[in-house]
Image (cartoon, helix red, strand yellow):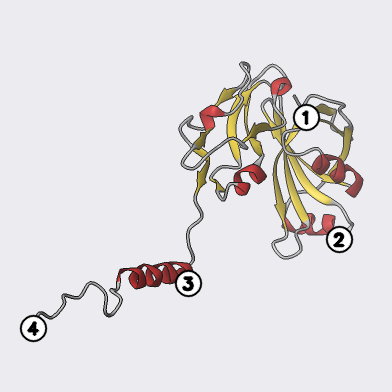
């Protein structure tokens, strides 16, 4: 579960608007907003050190944030991260204030291991889902769902409902959703042509064989 050491994230309020956000970035700060039940949205700016704390723990981690001059000192989770499409640099964050007594919905990553054993048998593991949606109390959030796929064989399928979901966590993703399936690799076009040619050659009669003898 993810309720671990809560480093306090400190932030300052900022002005709203596009120009204010750009000015914030020019100062080396990242604009963000804190919102949630029972509070008005609070536009804030984050220094790089505080940003690293938020990103390092992942989307499902519970942080404690303290916003200067507002009295806001509460639990939050990273709701979304906007990045520059070219540089990948973070340009904005949405932070969701949460209550430890209220259930939330979020996406939990799926970690599969043992793919090497599947590949060793000449098969491939085709991934369909990399995360599933769940609902639970913040203190019960799983960090990930881990499954050993080494024993899966051709045609076998891993479904969302097969994941090791704890009793205190409710799966929102449909249980019949396919997480992964084991398949036989498809032949390339060249391999298919070679196989067809080989089959055709095997079916052609050899001259002089099985021909009726002339009776004089």
**Vertical arrangement, residue 101 with respect to residue 212, above or below:** above
**Tags 4 and 3 touching, CB below 8 Å:** no
Q: Which mark is residue 62?
A: 1
Q: Earlier in the sequence, mark 1 or mark 4?
A: 1
Give the structural element (helix, strand or loop) at label 2: helix
Camera-side mark, 1 or 4: 4
Q: Earlier in the sequence, mark 1 or mark 3?
A: 1
Q: Earlier in the sequence, mark 2 or mark 1?
A: 2
Q: Which mark is residue 190?
A: 3
Is 141 displayed left or right of 193 in the figure? Answer: right
Percent position of residue 16, x then y: 75, 49
The CA distance from mark 2 to mark 1 is: 29 Å
Is 91 displayed left or right of 200 in the figure? Answer: right
Q: What residue is pinned by disc 2?
A: 26
Outermost residue toward the front in this view: 216
Q: Earlier in the sequence, mark 4 or mark 3?
A: 3
Q: Earlier in the sequence, mark 2 or mark 3?
A: 2
């Amino acid at each position: 579960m993810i309720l671990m050491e809560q480093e306090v994230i400190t932030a300052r309020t900022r002005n709203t608007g596009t120009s204010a956000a750009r000015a914030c970035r020019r100062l080396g700060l990242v604009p963000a907003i804190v919102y949630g039940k029972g509070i008005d949205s609070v536009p804030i700016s984050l220094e790089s050190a505080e940003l690293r704390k938020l990103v390092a723990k992942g989307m499902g981690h519970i942080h404690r944030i303290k916003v200067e001059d507002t009295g806001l000192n509460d639990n939050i989770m990273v709701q979304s991260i906007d990045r520059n499409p070219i540089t990948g640099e973070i340009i904005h964050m949405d932070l969701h204030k949460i209550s430890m007594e209220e259930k939330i919905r979020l996406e939990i990553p799926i970690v599969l291991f043992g793919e090497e054993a599947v590949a060793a048998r000449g098969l491939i593991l085709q991934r369909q889902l990399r995360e599933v949606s769940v609902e639970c109390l913040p203190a019960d959030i799983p960090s990930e769902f881990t499954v050993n796929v080494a024993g899966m064989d051709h045609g076998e399928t891993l479904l969302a409902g097969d994941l090791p979901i704890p009793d205190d966590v409710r799966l929102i993703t449909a249980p019949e959703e396919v997480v992964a399936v084991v398949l036989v690799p498809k032949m390339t076009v060249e391999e298919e042509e070679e196989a067809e040619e080989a089959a055709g050659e095997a079916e052609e009669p050899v001259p002089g064989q099985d021909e009726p003898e002339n009776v004089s």
